[in-house]
Image (cartoon, rainbow, N blue to C red):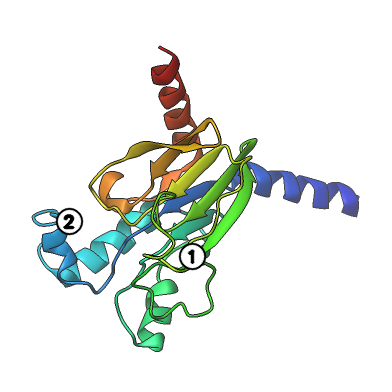
């Protein structure tokens, strides 16, 4: 009876949990409003911070898994950084970007198998030169998909050529996803669309 109950709880958790990706919130970063044309979507920095957090929490539940790929909050105040981290829903893995002064211990990259695909995630696109970003890491040859941030609104999809292979690269930065985290289902749909375009 106990084992049966535990199995039902695990099954329910598996069904209800979703996986999301996002990057480049740049909370507290007033200049980002101008750099990334976030005005008039957000009137000022306070409006942006509240709006981005509200958008995040509107799609992510506490049961969901979230990967944030760098540049979460623009502050050197560790307490303030931690406070902002606790305002967003979900079980969040924070990767470090070039503006994350409050994430000294965070990893710069991560590799996970999701939806049957081996996905490499980091803040910078794969072709950024290691000398420019000394924490760059050589991407394994067997990767199926690369997710990154850093480029904001400049582009959404690219292709990375490695050892004769063409690997899809998707920018999951908040600026190109309506200022909300994007689900793994949506990412897989985009990958399928990219493959069809390549072979179409």
Secondary structure beneath disc 2?
Answer: loop
**Is there any visible trace of residue 178 in the rendered image?**
no
| x and y, in percent, of residue 133 in the image | 40, 66
Asked where in the image residue 29 lies, by quadrant, the reply is bottom left
Image: 75 above or below 145? below
Residue drawn at 9 percent across, 63 percent down: 43
Question: Dot 2, crowdedness within 10 Å: few (<14), some or many (≥20)?
Answer: few
Callout 2–callout 1 Cβ contact below 8 Å: no
What residue do we see at 37% from left, 75% from top? 84
Label 2 and label 1: CA atoms lie apart by: 21 Å
Disc 1 target residue: 95
Q: Position of residue 171 (x, y in %)?
A: 37, 46
User: On the rendered image, what quadrant is the C terminus found in?
Assistant: top left
Q: Does residue 4 appear left or right of residue 68 in this picture?
A: right
The residue located at (59%, 41%) in the rendering is 143
Q: Is residue 65 left or right of residue 22?
A: right
Tell me: 48 left or right of 133.
left
Residue positioned most to the top: 200
Residue under pointer 2: 36
Task: Point out residue 157 in the picture as x, y percentages from the top left corner.
Answer: 35, 37
Crowding near pointer 1: few (<14 within 10 Å), some, many (20+)? many
Image location of residue 90, percent across then percent down: 51, 60
Asked whether 135 or 109 is in front, the reply is: 135
């Amino acid at each position: 009876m106990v084992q049966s109950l535990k199995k039902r709880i695990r099954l329910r958790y598996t069904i209800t949990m979703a996986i999301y990706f996002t990057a480049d919130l740049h909370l507290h970063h007033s200049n980002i409003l101008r750099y990334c044309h976030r005005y008039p979507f957000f009137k000022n920095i306070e409006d942006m911070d509240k709006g981005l957090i509200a958008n995040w929490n509107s799609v992510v539940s506490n049961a969901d898994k979230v990967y944030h790929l760098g540049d979460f909050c623009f502050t050197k105040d560790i307490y303030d950084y931690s406070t902002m981290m606790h305002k967003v829903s979900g079980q969040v893995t924070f990767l470090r970007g070039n503006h994350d002064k409050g994430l000294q211990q965070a990893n710069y990259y991560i590799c996970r198998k999701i939806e049957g695909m081996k996905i490499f995630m980091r803040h910078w696109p794969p072709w950024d030169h290691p000398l420019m970003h000394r924490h760059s890491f050589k991407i394994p040859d067997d990767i199926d998909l690369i997710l990154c941030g850093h480029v904001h609104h400049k582009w959404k999809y690219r292709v990375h050529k490695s050892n004769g292979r063409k690997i899809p690269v998707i920018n999951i930065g908040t600026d190109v996803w309506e200022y909300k985290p994007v689900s793994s289902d949506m990412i897989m749909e985009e990958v399928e669309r990219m493959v069809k375009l390549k072979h179409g």
